[in-house]
């Protein structure tokens, strides 16, 4: 079935868009396949300038009623949620009528980890009769394919750090903690939790500057993976040019992600940045990462 | 056997002292028991002002020859190493003749985690014919006893966070990563690796200020534990008044440590700070922590 046939059968795709360039990359990819997209940037997370030239409707986090009404009127069956939505304080949620009913569930989800919160959002969408899809289903071409992106290749020592990083993330996965770790010369330098990958990389850069990291500059790998129980429709680990810049500032040798399970935002700029910084970026096939 | 008898039989105690107030707390405790101590503060780590009024000999990290010579001349059999020694850059090591021979081993140890580095130091000390003891052996009264310190008590919700924190640290232990984690409402907010506990607490405080943590202020526990394979003679987790201040700035409910496996520095000041900040501090007996 061609993309155009999918578009006719399934109608436009509604996209709830958080921060970062990822939602627009997916939107472009879906639109290029002939399917119309309805953009719902999230106030406070999506970048206003990026949406100026596109048709869009601003929504607040929690206002799913607006999305549901517009999407239904336009004949949408499918909804994706993409982009960074840093775990909000409860007071930032402005629930509308529909979501108000779900609020006790949302508050309950807050007591658990991110996975609980996210799977709850998925349930709200499905309860309204939509299909809740992931980026990997509507734009599979944005996922990392096995192999290196760019010219850099990991050394044998980097391979050992990569294996240790994936093993660590597997062990920590059941605790619903972050998806990334920095390993240098078989030493775990930093573990991501609530702060996010960019902040963790900035921390490694600082530790290096202050001489608190014993390993030489140029050693170390950022390893990212999906949590074992993660709902891949909502959230997949993603890397982009900014990740490469952060890794370069932290004087790392490279970045390793799980092939097929990681979104690559702006791949051309990413490769350009990686080659300029002499940083390798590798997507490791499932089963061989550890 | 009384402390005085131990002192006669084993001679003075040589103490290699890193940063923080812990080495001097142990020195006072040992001296109060009637045993003489020889202090070797580490240049660049120990605080000069704190040693001014005591007999001491400054040494550089790696200059074990000086320690061995003086200790032997004074009839020492036992050596302890205490206080924070942030993993140094290799260029900060100034090896003397004795340690120079051990340098290849030390460099090799750098390729592994902290545990490898530390156990290597223990081997160097023992190769010179000394006994390498831990603070828990020379001053057992500085270890946390089961129960709360101060007035605060954890709530049932705090108990759940404490259990999750210990479980996480057990799972991450084999990776030779940090010894502390912050858990709030069953959500892992921060994991300590190379940055140390104080910096991790500062990060949680920042994340809270910027609204990136969804849990209410006053929720959350700092959980510290020894790594499963950690050589307890070299390094035990420790808490002190500064830990309490960091936890208070991060708006946590309290601090949980493993009883018998954690050093409490300046216990009176710690209790005072904890009670003033309305923060609980609990030492959980082994076997019941998770």
Image: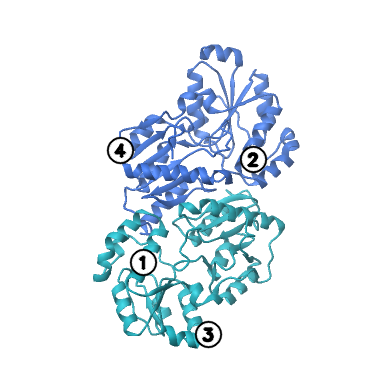
Chain colours: A blue, B cyan
Q: Residues within 10 Å of mark 2 (few under 14, many from 20)?
A: some
State the separation of the CA atoms marked 2 and 1.
Answer: 47 Å
Q: Residues within 10 Å of mark 4 (few under 14, many from 20)?
A: few
Query: Are the residues under badges 3 and 2 in a single subunit?
Result: no
Residue A37 position within the rendered picture, expressed as x and y whole percent measured from the top left: 56, 22
In the rendered image, residue B161, in percent from the top left (x then y), is placed at 64, 54
Residue at mark 4 to residue at mark 2: CA–CA distance: 40 Å
From what the image shows, is residue B143 above or below residue B247?
A: below
Q: Secondary structure at mark 1?
A: helix
Marks 4, 2 in one chain: yes
Pointers 4 and 1 within a single chain: no
Q: Are marks 3 and 2 in contact (CB under 8 Å)?
A: no
Disc 2 element: helix
Q: Answer with mark 1 or mark 3, whichever residue precedes in sequence.
A: 3
Mark 3 → mark 2, Cα distance in angstroms: 58 Å
Residue B21 is at least partly visible in this image: no
How far apart, in angstroms, are the residues tagged by discs 4 and 3? 68 Å
| Residue receiving disc 1 | B123
Foreground: disc 2 or disc 1: 1
The quadrant of the rendering that contains the C terminus of chain B is: bottom right
- Apparent side of residue A240 relative to residue B179 in the rendered image (left or right): left
Residue at 58%, 22% (x, y): give it. Answer: A13
| Residue A96, quarter of picture | top right
Q: Chain of mark 4?
A: A
Q: Residues within 10 Å of mark 3 (few under 14, many from 20)?
A: few
Q: Which mark is residue A190?
A: none
Q: Which residue is mark 2?
A: A116
* Number of the label disc, if any, that sits on residue B1: 3
| Secondary structure category for the residue under label 3 | loop
Q: Nearer the observer, disc 4 or disc 1?
A: 1
Residue A104 sits in quarter: top right
């Amino acid at each position: 079935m061609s993309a155009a046939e999918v578009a006719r059968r399934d109608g436009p795709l509604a996209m709830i868009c958080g921060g970062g360039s990822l939602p627009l990359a997916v939107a472009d990819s879906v639109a290029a396949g002939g399917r119309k997209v309805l953009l719902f940037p999230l106030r406070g997370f999506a970048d206003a300038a990026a949406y100026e030239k596109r048709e869009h409707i601003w929504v607040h986090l929690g206002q799913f009623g607006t999305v549901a009404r517009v999407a239904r009127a336009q004949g949408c069956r499918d909804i994706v949620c993409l982009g960074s939505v840093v775990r909000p304080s409860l007071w930032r949620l402005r629930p509308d009528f529909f979501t108000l009913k779900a609020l006790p569930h949302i508050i309950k989800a807050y007591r658990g980890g991110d996975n609980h919160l996210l799977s709850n959002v998925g349930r709200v969408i499905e309860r309204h009769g939509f299909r809740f899809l992931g980026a990997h289903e509507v734009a599979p071409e944005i996922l990392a394919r096995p192999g290196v992106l760019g010219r850099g290749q990991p050394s044998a020592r980097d391979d050992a750090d990569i294996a240790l990083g994936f093993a660590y993330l597997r062990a920590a996965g059941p605790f619903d903690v972050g998806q990334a770790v920095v390993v240098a010369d078989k030493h775990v330098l930093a573990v991501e939790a609530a702060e996010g990958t960019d902040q963790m990389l900035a921390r490694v850069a600082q530790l290096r500057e202050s001489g608190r990291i014993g390993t030489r500059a140029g050693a170390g790998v950022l390893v990212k993976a999906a949590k074992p129980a993660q709902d891949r429709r909502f959230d997949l680990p993603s890397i982009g040019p900014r990740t490469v810049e952060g890794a370069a500032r932290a004087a790392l040798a490279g970045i390793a992600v799980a092939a097929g399970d990681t979104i690559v935002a702006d791949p051309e700029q990413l490769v350009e940045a990686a080659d300029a910084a002499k940083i390798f970026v590798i997507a490791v096939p499932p089963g061989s990462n550890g």
